[in-house]
Image (tube, rainbow, N blue to C red):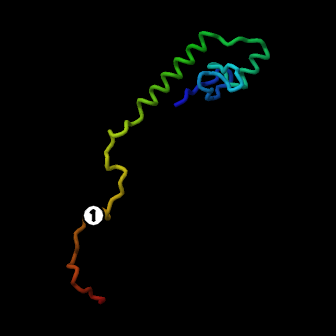
Amino acid sequence: MRLVFVCQQCGAHYFPPAGLVYPDGGRASAVWCSWCQVEAADRGVAEPAGLAAMAMILAVRAMEAAVAARPRPGTADPRSDRRPSRPARTGRGQLRPNGARSRLG
């Protein structure tokens, strides 16, 4: 699973790369999405260290909660994914024997 962050500038949800490092070597932000990070860099605003640490803690907790909510393999009903081999029986019994003829017949 990947960590999900919420941009503190625009409110968008984003998935930074693992390790918060882009393939080109740039550092991803835990506070801002890539668009807002570029705007902050253009204005000369540094990422707040305390806010970045809190964003990491919240993202890790959310991921742990999502993992804990998933059912573990083998704990669910082992037959829940099988289709029935015959139609389910209804509560009604037969009104007449199979060999009896109807009035129309």
Q: Secondary structure at mark 1?
A: loop
Image spot of residue 5 (x, y percent): 59, 25
Q: Is residue 73 above or below residue 64?
A: below
**Residue at the disc numbered 1:** 89
Q: Is residue 104 left or right of residue 71?
A: left
| Residue visible at 75% across and 21% down in the picture | 38
Residue at the outermost left position: 97
Q: Is residue 66 left or right of residue 52?
A: left
Image spot of residue 55 (x, y percent): 57, 18
Q: Is residue 103 left or right of residue 31?
A: left
Image spot of residue 29 (x, y percent): 65, 19
Residue 39: image quadrant is: top right
Q: Is residue 8 above or below residue 86?
A: above
Q: Is residue 43 above or below residue 82?
A: above
Q: Can you see residue 13?
A: no
Residue at the outermost right position: 42
Q: Hey, what amino acid is under mark 1?
A: Arg
| Residue visible at 44% across and 27% down in the picture | 65
Image spot of residue 1 (x, y percent): 52, 31
Q: Quadrant of the C terminus?
A: bottom left
Tag count:
1
| Residue visible at 60% across and 14% down in the picture | 52
Residues packed near mark 1 inside 10 Å, few (<14), some (14 to 19) or many (20 plus): few
Q: Is residue 22 above or below residue 49?
A: below
Q: Can you see residue 11?
A: yes
Residue 93: image quadrant is: bottom left
Which sits in the foreground, 77 or 19?
19
Residue 40: image quadrant is: top right
| Residue visible at 25% across and 67% down in the picture | 92
Q: Is residue 65 left or right of residue 98?
A: right
